[in-house]
Image: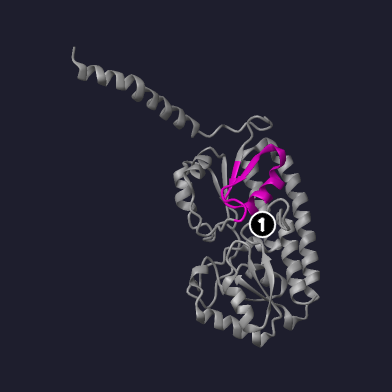
Amino acid sequence: MNYTILRKKIYYIFFAVPSLLFLLTACSSFKRSEPTPGNLNNKPLILTTFTVLADIARNIGGERVVVKSITKVGAEIHGYQPTPSDIVSASKADLIIQNGLGLELWSEKFTAAAGNVPTVVLSDGIKPLLIQGDVYAGKPNPHAWMSPKRAIHYTNGIKNALVKLDPEGKEIFESNASNYKLKLYELDQQLRHKLSLIPKEKRILVSCEGAFSYLANDYGLDEAYLWPVNAESQVTPRSMLKLISIIKDRKVPTIFCESTVSEKAQLQVARSSGASFGGKFYVDSLSGPKGPASTFLDLHRHNVGLILRGLGF
C-alpha cells in the first residue's frame, strides 16, 4: 500500500473538508439579509460611523430598524482603525450612515471592503465652513452636527435614506423625523436665548479642537482652539502661546477640552494664561447611558451648560 497516498487521503478527510465547510459557512454569513419591513425577526440593520449619528438614526427609525455604531462610546473618530469584525458587521448591513467632510478618514476603504452596501453621507448639501489660518486652511470643518440648526439637515438625510430602504415604513419615518425636528427646533431656540445672555464681548469659546465652528457661527460666538481638526498630535509651543495670548487679551475666564482627546496641553494653557479649566465637552461621541450626554439632545444641553457656567452665566 502506498502510505503517502493514504496519509494525504486522511489529511483531506479530517482537515481539508472541515476547513472548506467553514469557509463556505463564513462566506454565507457575510451576505446581507433582505430587509422585511415590519418583520421583527428580520429588521434592516443600519450601521453608523459614530454614536451621535446612531442616536439620531434610532429616533427616526424607531422599532422598524436596528441601529449600531461602528465606533464605541468614547472612541476618537478621525483616526479610527476599523477592525475585521467591523468589516464583517458592515458586510451584513443594509445601510451605512456617515458624516462626510473628511471626518471619517477611513470610511472610503472601509465601505469598499464591506461590499456593495448603500451609503448615505449626511453632510451632503451643507455649505461647509472652511478652516482658517492653519495647515488645514481651506479644508472643510466636518463638525456640522454640533449646531442644532444643521442637525435638522442630518435628520432629513436619515429619514430620506430610511424611506428609500423601507418604503412601507414611510409614514413612521416621516412622523418620527417631524417629532425629532420639533425637539431640535426647541433646542435651537433655547440655546439661542441662553447664549444671548452672554455679553457680546465675552462670547468666546476656547476648546482643544475647533469642533464648535458651526455652533459659533450660528449662535454668535467667537472661537479659539489648539488644533482645528484631527491634529491633537500637532500641538506645538507656538500654537499654545498663540492661544494663551488670545485668552489673556480677551480675558477669557474658563477654557475647555473634548471627551475623546487628552486635556494635558489645555491644562498647561490654563495654568499659563490664568484661566480655569471648565471641563470636557462631548463632540465626537456620546457618553455612557448614565453620563451627561447619553443622547444627542443631552450632548448639546451639557455643552451649553458648561459654556454658560464657564463664562459666568
Going 55% across and 79% down the picture, which residue do you hit?
240
Going 77% across and 59% down the picture, which residue do you hit?
185
Colour mapping used in the image: one colour
Q: In the picture, residue 186 is in which quadrant?
A: bottom right
- The residue segment tinted magenta is 46-74
Observer-nearest of 120 and 298: 298
Q: Is residue 101 above or below residue 238?
A: above
User: Which type of secondary structure does the marked residue at label 1 adopt?
Assistant: helix
From the top left corner, tell me how far across and down residue 154 is, in percent. 65, 55
Q: Is residue 227 above or below residue 248?
A: above
Observer-nearest of 207 and 290: 290
From the top left corner, tell me how far across and down residue 21 is, in percent. 41, 24
- Residue 19 painted magenta: no
Which residue in the structure is indicated by mark 1? 153
From the top left corner, tell me how far across and down residue 34 is, in percent. 57, 32
From the top left corner, tell me how far across and down residue 6 is, in percent. 24, 16
Seen in the image, is 135 located left or right of residue 311?
left
**Residue ranking furthest to the bottom:** 249
The amino acid pointed to by label 1 is: His
- Residue 72 painted magenta: yes
Circle 1 packing at 10 Å, graded few (<14), some (14-19), many (20+), is some
Q: Quadrant of the C terminus?
A: bottom right
